[in-house]
Structures are given as structure tokens and as C-alpha cells.
Image (tube, helix red, strand yellow):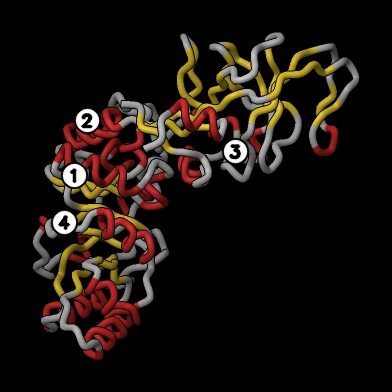
Amino acid sequence: MISQNEALTRRGLAFLRSKEALIHNAKVVMEYSGAKRLIAVIKANGYGHGDVWAARTFYQSLGVKDFAVATLDEGERVRRGMPEEDVNVLLLGVQPAELADEMAEQRLSPVAGSFDWLLTAQKALHESKEESILKVHLAVDTGMGRLGAKTKAELASMVDLVRSDAQFELAGVMTHFATADEDNQGYYDQQLADFMTKVDGLDIPKNLWHLANSGSALFHRDELPTETIRVGSVLYGYNPAMPARKCPVELQPVASLVGRVWSVHPLLRGESLSYGATYTAQEDQWVGTVPIGYADGLKRYLVGATVLVNGQKQRILGRITMDQIVISLPGKLPVNTKVTFFGKDGDEEITIEELANFGKTIPHELLTGISDRVPRVDID
């Protein structure tokens, strides 16, 4: 594992991450929601933090055995990193049913979104030379509109098919809430009621239900079963409902993004910089070049965003390019001066929520967009 100093010396950038914060967040959200079982969502490379890193931390520190990713490739990578027999890897996104035999052999559990998907998967399993068992989670579409049984009759047919074939195992039933972290209680109530209606009478044990996403675990804990929660964003230390709702628990940011100024130079009054010459100095000033750009995940729409330099607020000047940016400096500073894009520096802090608000986006997009060429560094 590369050190922070090595990363900053070699690359001028480091994505710092804390196992202690990750563990803290899992504990507080489980305690607050009353959960006994956590399905930790680690898709998109653990929301940018590292999928196997997060899974290994949860498994070793808290005994978490259930993890959720989005794609088959993500699932296979996590399975290689987590080969333990008691670890379950759930594939949340739509998967090619023709590869059901591969999923079974890799011990990956897909979400079945329709009766037709199950029929195709069944054919693939029966034609395979192996006789592996495919654990499936049945999706119920209650208003998200992406996948899942649309009617109770279809869900009942899916349950019957899975129970009638020895190469299937019913591992769960789920839905996904579209407004759990928004001020739309009516739509939320409608989705929950629809789920309850569709599963009623199908004799699916409640310990197989997993409904609560991050928004539900934080803001709807008294309205639905939360014995099992399936959460992502809260684990990484930010409020999925920002800025509309205050987070009811104290989360700790897991990550911060820091860099170094690799060039310091004066910008004279009237001089411009970067593509398009969109920034022109109104007075003589000192500026610094930092080796980060949109190829690293610093989105172009973050022009003008605040950064911290020696604990002082400065700004990104001019257009963000693929590999470099220019920032304002409070004066002539030494090369290799630290820059913080989100995180703490002295008494000041820029949260990922604040940066997302500036960019009119959400923390999920910023964190998952930080590319692999930014070194990940453990800080505890």
C-alpha cells in the first residue's frame, strides 16, 4: 500500500480514506435503524473508495457477510478479493440471463427482474455441464421503473419457478424507493404499500426481505422492516438527503482529496489563463498549478470552487483541463504546498456535500468519478 507522502511526491494527488470512519458509519446507521443485518453496497468501486477494501474492512471488523455491486465484472472482482465461503455478493443491476451458469459458478447472486429473465437463466443453468445453484433475489417494481415484477401475478409466477427448480435458490426479495431521501412522503407510502400487497400470501420469509436503502434507514425507520438494510451512501459518511434534510446521526467522512502545488508563479494584472482565457487577473496575484483535472474526476463544472491552501480558502481559476488546474494563492508559497479539495485543513473544512452543492450535483457523482489514476491511501 502506497503512503500519503509517496502518493503526493509521485503523483501530486492522494485520495485519503479511513477504515475507522467506515466502521463508525456502519455501526451508527445499524443502531439507529435497528438493523441486525447489513447488505453493504460497494458498487462503483465502493463509491470510489475501493470495493474490496470496503468489503474486507466490514468483514474483518464487523462480521458483515453481504455485499452488493452493480455489474457482473464488479461482482467477479469482489469475489476474487472475498473468496470466503460465507460471503454473499449480490448483483443489483440488470445482468445477462444467458450467463446465469457463470454467475452460479462464481457464487454471485443476481436480481431477477422478470419471469422471462428467470426462464432464460433456467435454460442456461440446465445447458451447463456444471450443476451449480444460482441464488436469486426477486425484484418488485413499485415505482422506480427500472426492473422488477410489475404485478402480483408475475411475482407469484417467479416465486413458483424458483421454488420448483433445484438449481435455483430464493435468496431475497427487494424493491427500491425513489423518494426515500426526498420530501415526497406520498410516493414513498405508495411504493411501500404496493410492495406489501404484492408479497402478501406468497409465504416469503421476512428475513429474506431487504427494502431499506440509505434514505429509508435514516428517515423511514419506523415505517418499514429494517431488520436487514441495504445501504451505500451513509457508509461513506455523507447525507443522501442533503441539503433538504438534516442527517439524524453523526456520520464521519471516510474520504478526503488532497494534492500539491507543483508550480508557483505570478499572474499580472490583465493576464489570462487556461483554455478560452476565461479568467483574467484584475490585479497582480500569485497562482499555483496542481496536477489534477477532469481525467482524475475533478469535473469541469467545478470552476470557481473553493479549495483549502494552508487552511485558507482559495479558488479554482479558469477552466479545468484534463490534467491540471490553476488556483489562487494567498501569496508566494513554496512548491509542494498542500491543497485540499474536500476534507479538513487546520480549522477549515470543505465537505463533499458542500462541493456537490457548488456543482449542483450529488456527492455520489463526485466520489464515483474519481479515477483510478488517483492513488488511494489509508490514513489509519
x, y percent for residue 316: 68, 26
Between marks 4 and 2 in the image, the one whose residue lies nearer the viewer: 4
Q: Residues within 10 Å of mark 1 (few under 14, many from 20)?
A: some
Q: CA distance from mark 1 to mark 2?
A: 16 Å
Between marks 3 and 2 in the image, the one whose residue lies nearer the viewer: 3
- Image-based side of 251 in relation to 132, left or right: right
Residue at 36% x, 66% y: name it.
72
- Give yes or no for contact between labels 4 and 3 (Cβ–Cβ under 8 Å): no
- Residue picked out by circle 4: 84
Q: Is residue 360 above or below residue 330?
A: below
**Residue 109 can be seen, yes or no:** yes
Looking at the rendered structure, which numbered label has been put on residue 298? 3
Q: Earlier in the sequence, mark 4 or mark 3?
A: 4
Q: Residues within 10 Å of mark 4 (few under 14, many from 20)?
A: few
- Image-based side of 284 in relation to 202, left or right: right
Q: Dot 2: what SS?
A: helix
- Give yes or no for contact between labels 3 and 2 (Cβ–Cβ under 8 Å): no
Q: Residues within 10 Å of mark 3 (few under 14, many from 20)?
A: many
Instruction: State the count of labels.
Output: 4
- Residue picked out by circle 1: 59
